[in-house]
């Protein structure tokens, strides 16, 4: 029988330490909606998403009440739209009209976000891919909850530098258009990847990969607050104790995700895909990955030792989580977004955390340079250069890396950019402005790396 | 198969907490399987394991009513959660 102590522990994790299930994400294949007529295509997309996801939000809320665990977001990911719209879309405006359909349908079923306004161009771009990429600034500033992602490289294919160059200007243009239209900076809903996973439930990078089934349910857990609270009890203990404590907490957190995923699958009648074992912070005080690093013994995230501490944290989270779930996937690791994590914001404000240090940290944890606000006058080629560096880390280390950089027009280093809600706020971080345009302006792609001679 | 839920009651100690909660459970066809209780610094902490197999109303409604009974009539916080979440976290 369950004991009073165990019940109290679970409820303290939920109430005091912000333990929650971050998202139930329904992946929906739109491949069967493809049509050469744009109006037909948009109708089919609406109908399929509505049919599959109409009960998602209600079911999520029911599960949340039954177990007393908050399920913060209900989301949808769809097949990359560059594939679905390839036959119907002749211009970028055609793609934007699909984005609007996605936005309206997502609002109709009541989800928080819909991801999949995406193109997979790790080796090269089709004309449809390029049209979609060029439509991103318009699409993200005329819709509210559609998220976009572009996969620019992979370990197997190398890095498509033409697309990297294009994304530099797209990111800049999106920021400027958002400013002009006085809407949320569209770059907060746009991420570029190397080795993008097909089953990631987290935004902005969620899309439903072509290797997936028709409809699938993926769950992303959270719980940095719970890990931090557990570590408070082992201050000064050795690394073995530290590892064990992180593993045990990650196990418990992931078990909740597994339970919710199974239950959602049973109630909605769609197969369970994966649990993503990520430590995903929010701007709420105490729900911070940076605070875990501080609890491990660093003054601020970014201090010497940060990369080692994060490597260990990430590995133990995986070790604890892997046993707790039958299928693990997505990004699975610690997220280090700057604006969504109060501890990261504090570190950046104190001058402890730079983009270069964050880049090093992304070598050992999931995702990458995430939610980083940079000066609005940063050159497009500099943005492309930062992206190329981050993609190279992913390509060579056979891991997923990503960039969600947000140039903020009119703001300079030291100013603050406000995004609101789960996206938080961020100090504008300094960028290394030495020129890289002659490198970025070269055509073609960086070849795939050799897989032996490891050093 | 028996379906079980965990009820937790936390709040300032007062006369009749258990009586009122148990009365409500009996009215709704719920059998209590186990009760443990402690008082820490004047605060009442109780956990019940109950059998909800023959619950007469939807679980959702039941847990909302129970929490209302706690906050409006007794002045304590009552939560009711299905047992599966604790099993998942604390049992391999």
Image (tube, coloured by chain):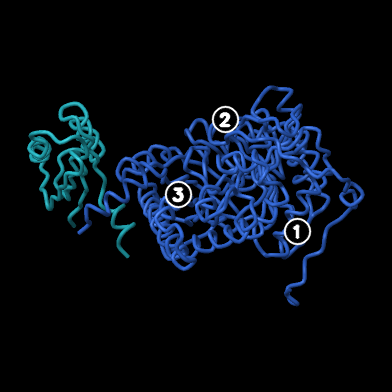
Chain colours: A blue, B cyan
Q: Which element is circle 2 on?
A: loop
Chain letter for mark 3, please. Answer: A
Regarding residue A296, the answer to whether it shows in the image is yes
Q: For the N terminus of chain A, which image quadrant?
A: bottom left
Mark with earlier residue (2, 1): 1
Residue drawn at x 65%, y 51% as measured from the top left: A368
Whether labels 2 and 1 belong to a single chain: the reply is yes
Q: Residue at x 26, y 38 (%)?
A: B60
Find disc 2 in the rendering and name its residue.
A420
Quarter of the image where one finds residue A334? bottom right
A83 or A168, which is in the foreground? Answer: A168
Disc 1 target residue: A392
In three-dimensional space, the C-alpha distance between marks 3 and 2, rounded to whole angstroms, equals 21 Å
Q: How far from the left and from the top, in percent, is residue A171? A: 75, 38
Q: Cα distance, mark 3 to mark 1?
A: 30 Å
Which of the two labelled residues, at mark 3 and mark 2, occupies the earlier sequence position?
A: 3
């Amino acid at each position: 029988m369950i004991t009073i102590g165990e019940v109290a522990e679970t409820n303290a994790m939920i109430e005091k330490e912000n333990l929650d299930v971050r998202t139930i994400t329904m992946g929906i294949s739109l491949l069967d909606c493809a049509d050469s007529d744009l109006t037909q295509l948009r109708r089919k997309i609406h109908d399929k998403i509505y049919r599959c996801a109409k009960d998602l939000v209600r079911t999520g809320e029911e599960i949340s009440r039954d177990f007393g665990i908050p399920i913060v977001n209900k989301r949808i990911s769809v097949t990359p739209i560059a594939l679905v719209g390839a036959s119907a879309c002749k211009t970028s405006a055609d793609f934007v009209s699909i984005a609007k359909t996605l936005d309206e349908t997502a609002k109709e079923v009541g989800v928080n976000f819909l991801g999949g306004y995406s193109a997979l161009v790790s080796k090269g771009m089709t004309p449809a891919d390029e049209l979609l990429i060029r439509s991103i600034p318009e699409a993200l500033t005329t819709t509210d909850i559609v998220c976009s992602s572009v996969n620019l490289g992979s370990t197997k294919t190398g890095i498509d530098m033409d697309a990297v160059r294009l994304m530099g200007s797209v990111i800049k243009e999106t920021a400027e258009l958002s400013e002009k239209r006085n809407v949320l900076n569209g770059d907060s809903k746009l991420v570029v990847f190397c080795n993008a996973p097909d089953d990631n439930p987290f935004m902005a990078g969620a899309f439903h990969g072509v290797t997936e089934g028709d409809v699938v349910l993926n769950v992303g857990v959270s719980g940095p607050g719970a890990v931090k609270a557990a570590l408070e009890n082992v201050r000064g203990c050795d690394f073995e104790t530290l590892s064990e404590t992180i593993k045990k907490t990650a196990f418990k957190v992931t078990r909740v995700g597994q339970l919710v995923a199974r239950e959602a699958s049973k109630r909605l009648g769609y197969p369970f895909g994966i649990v993503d074992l990520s430590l995903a912070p929010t701007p709420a005080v105490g729900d911070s990955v940076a605070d875990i690093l501080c609890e491990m013994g660093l003054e601020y995230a970014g201090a010497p030792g940060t990369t080692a501490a994060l490597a260990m944290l990430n590995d133990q989270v995986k070790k604890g989580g892997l046993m707790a779930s039958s299928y693990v996937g997505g990004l699975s690791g610690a997220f280090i977004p700057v604006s969504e994590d109060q501890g990261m914001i504090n570190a950046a404000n104190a001058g402890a955390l730079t983009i270069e240090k964050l880049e090093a940290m992304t070598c050992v944890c999931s995702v990458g340079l995430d939610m980083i606000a940079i000066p609005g006058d940063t050159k497009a080629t500099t943005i492309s250069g930062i992206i190329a560096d981050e993609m190279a880390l992913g390509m060579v280390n056979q891991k997923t890396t990503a960039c969600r950089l947000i140039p903020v027009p009119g703001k300079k280093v030291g100013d603050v950019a406000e995004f609101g809600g789960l996206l938080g706020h961020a100090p504008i971080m300094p960028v290394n402005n030495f020129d890289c345009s002659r490198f970025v302006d070269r055509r073609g792609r960086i070849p795939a790396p050799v897989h032996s001679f490891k050093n | 198969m028996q379906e079980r839920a965990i009820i937790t009651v936390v709040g300032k100690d007062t006369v009749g907490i258990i009586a009122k909660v148990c009365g409500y459970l009996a009215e709704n066809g719920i059998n209590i399987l186990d009760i443990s209780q402690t008082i820490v610094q004047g605060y009442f902490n109780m956990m019940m394991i109950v059998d909800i197999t023959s619950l007469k109303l939807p679980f959702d409604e039941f847990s909302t009513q129970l929490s209302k009974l706690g906050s409006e009539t007794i002045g304590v916080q009552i939560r009711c959660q299905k047992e599966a979440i604790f099993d998942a976290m604390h049992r391999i």
